[in-house]
Image (cartoon, rainbow, N blue to C red):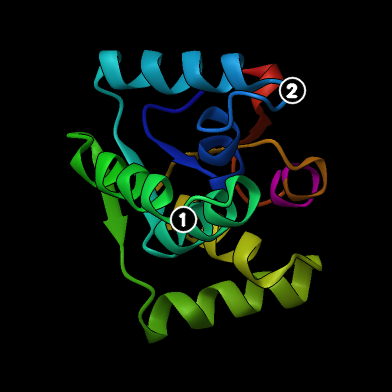
Amino acid sequence: MSDALTIDASVFVNAFSPTEVGSEQSWRFLTQIHRAGIPVYVPTLALVEVVASLARKQNNTTMALDWMEEIQQLPHMVFVELDISLAQEAAEIAARHRLRGSDAVYVAVARRFGAALVTLDAEQQERAAVIVPARRLEDV
């Protein structure tokens, strides 16, 4: 595993959803990297994805927005803005590797910062692995 990580929104959503399968593992993983001070590079898109998913799944706007605040306060989290350069890079990755748009944004961030991608999404992991070190959470 590289010294830096890019963590897909799927891991955050799973960690913050205690009734989901694997939630404890996701929570432990996030806690461990936080304690270890490992830098985490995520696109600002992660905030939208996490909040939207949590608000929909748990039907709780306040809780979802509170988690956004918590994520933003993590000291080793670096939020990467989706500017035109990153969008173009992600679009190229999406087209060449048949990734969903948002998945390609995470891969582009990981590539740009030399980070390993961690996800719960098997398709994203498989297709990203030819570009960046990519692992499913259960393999970390």
Give amino acid for label 1: Val
How packed mark 2 is, by other alpha carbons closer than 10 Å (few <14, some 14-19, many 20 or more), is few
Q: Which mark is residue 66?
A: none
Q: Disc 2 vs disc 1: Cβ atoms closer than 8 Å?
A: no
Judge whether 99 appears above or below 32 on screen.
Answer: below
Judge whether 97 appears above or below 50 on screen.
Answer: below
User: In the displayed structure, does residue 35 sit left or right of residue 56?
Assistant: left
The segment highlighted magenta reads 125-129
Residue depicted at 74% across the width and 50% down the height: 124
- Residue 60 lies, in percent from the top left, at 49, 50
Residue depicted at 58% across the width and 52% down the height: 59
CA gap, disc 2 and disc 1? 19 Å
Which sits in the foreground, 6 or 23? 23
How packed mark 1 is, by other alpha carbons closer than 10 Å (few <14, some 14-19, many 20 or more), is many
Location of mark 1 (residue): 51
The secondary element bearing badge 2 is classed as: loop
Judge whether 25 appears above or below 111 on screen.
Answer: above
Give amino acid for label 2: Val
Which sits in the foreground, 44 or 88? 44
- Residue 48 lies, in percent from the top left, at 45, 63
Tell me which secondary structure the magenta stretch mostly adopts. helix
- Residue 69 lies, in percent from the top left, at 25, 47
Q: Was residue 47 drawn as part of the magenta stretch in this picture?
A: no
User: Earlier along the polypeptide chain: callout 2 or callout 1?
Assistant: 2
The secondary element bearing badge 1 is classed as: helix
Location of mark 2 (residue): 21
